[in-house]
Amino acid sequence: MVLLSLAIGFLLAQGDRSLPKVRDFSWKNKQVGARDTAFVLTFSRPMDRASVEANLHVEPPLPGKISWSGRRLVYTSIAPPQYDRTYTISLQQAREKLGSDKQGNAIAPFVSQFSTPDRAFVYTGTEAAEKGRLILYNLTRQQKIILTPENLVVKDYRIYPAGDRILFSASEWSKYQPGLYEQSLYAVTTGRSSDPAQKPGSIQQILGNQDYENLKFDLSGDGKAIAIQRAKRGNAEDIGLWVVRSSTSPVPQRLLSRPAGEFAIAPDSATFANPQADGIAILSLTPNVKPLEFIPSFRRVFSFTPDGRESAMLKYNSDFTQSIFLVTNQGLQKELIRTAGEFLNCQFDPRNPQLYCLLTRRKPGKEFSEQLTLEAINLHTFAVKALLVLPDQVETKMSLSPDGLELLLDRLVVKKSEPVAGDLRTEGGSAIASSTLILLNLKNAPTSNNSPLPQELPVKGFRPRWLP
């Protein structure tokens, strides 16, 4: 008995000599995307923070900032991870903390992994059996999946934040005619889901068109709200903006009883920007709430930064030019770029302080002629750099990848003849003859003096959008 007591006392005097370790890694073996901005490491013991920070490695590099809460390390990335990658995180030689200035044992070596999704996008097909249908193209695997049935012609669409579903408006081909607004709102699965039972192409109707014509719509960043412009059948003056809160029980609620322009839901998923004749109204997505803010002089919001603190707004100038302004939520306004033509789209780069704009500029000479260009604006120096000139473009759409490394453009060719039944049409009503998709690699665009080379993809379609 005496010997046993002595042995126990000896062990207690020596203390716990087991090695400290990483008890939990929040991204272990998970697939993460641009919306996932931070991971957490939880340690079994208090750690010497400086030694942890000096020895923590992520490959490929993922720039970020470290903060602490007790035994938990929070690593917040300052740029989205690259897609189509497997990341390895490792920690060795970090030491536990014994007192105010003492270090204990070195940590048990830790290695783990996480991955990012394949590079994939959605577009509307233009060829043969694909005409008017939503198509998912996996760029990593060079695989194509048709998502919507051949009897529906897709008018527009938005992708849910998880990339597992797509919200789209479509009508029967027999009702696809100029001046007819017979489209209903649907959701279709993409197959990107943690549930292996979810197959691509499963369709659910969200909103019909029996009493109202469904016009423009937008989807909130959290995927929980749909804002949609609707017009009462038989009463052209009864037009307004409605909100649908749930796809499982879609009961539209009226927000506005006056026409809405190119409205856009803000990143907070609670407010939206509604263009008016003399400016932009910031309104709540909750009915019967007074306007929250009014920003005079602007005509449209093209893009928000992911945190919603900045936006790119369009302004019409008195000299018949157009400008894009950087507008902050603190009220600061800075003109970035101006053209005597028009702006088609602008999108913020999620990786760099940069804005990409698609616009037309007038060609020099006596005869009036315009050319379409893609230009990048550095938001630190405000320098403007032309990246690409696009000849003879019609209603070109662009989409920036969620990691900011690639950009998609469509190249439409229209028929010279009048549209006939079975023709896809542009927003202006012209019949589409064909359309190709162009890919630009932007990895070195912010620092390189050379313009990125456009790559034509082996698919035929238009209106591309990257999966998040």
Image: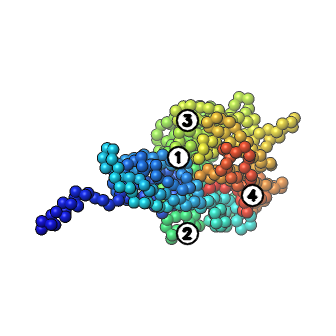
**In this figure, which residue is indicated by the disc labeled 3?**
328
For residue 78, which numbered disc appears in the image?
1
- Tell me which residue sits at (77%, 39%) in the image: 361
**In this figure, which residue is indicated by the disc labeled 4?**
456
Q: Secondary structure at mark 2?
A: loop
Q: Nearer the viewer, residue 270 or 365?
A: 365
Q: Quadrant of the C terminus?
A: bottom right
Disc 1 versus disc 3: distance between alpha carbons?
A: 19 Å
Q: Where residue 65 appears, x then y in whole percent?
A: 48, 46
Q: How many marks?
A: 4
For mark 3, does the 10 Å Cα neighbourhood hold few (<14), some (14 to 19), or many (20 or more) residues? Answer: some
For residue 199, which numbered disc appears in the image?
2
For mark 1, does the 10 Å Cα neighbourhood hold few (<14), some (14 to 19), or many (20 or more) residues? Answer: some
Q: Nearer the viewer, mark 3 or mark 4?
A: 4
Query: Quick one: label 2 or label 3, which is nearer the N terminus?
Result: 2
Q: Amino acid at mark 2?
A: Lys
Q: Is residue 71 left or right of residue 452?
A: left
**Is residue 318 depicted above or below 454 in this figure?**
above
Q: Nearer the viewer, residue 439 or 234?
A: 439
- Tell me which residue sits at (68%, 52%) in the image: 441
- Tell me which residue sits at (58%, 39%) in the image: 311
Query: Quick one: label 3 or label 4, which is nearer the N terminus?
Result: 3
Q: Where residue 70 appears, x then y in whole percent?
A: 35, 48
Q: Is residue 267 left or right of residue 420?
A: left
Query: Quick one: label 1 or label 4, which is nearer the N terminus?
Result: 1
Q: Amino acid at mark 4?
A: Glu
Q: Nearer the viewer, mark 2 or mark 3?
A: 3
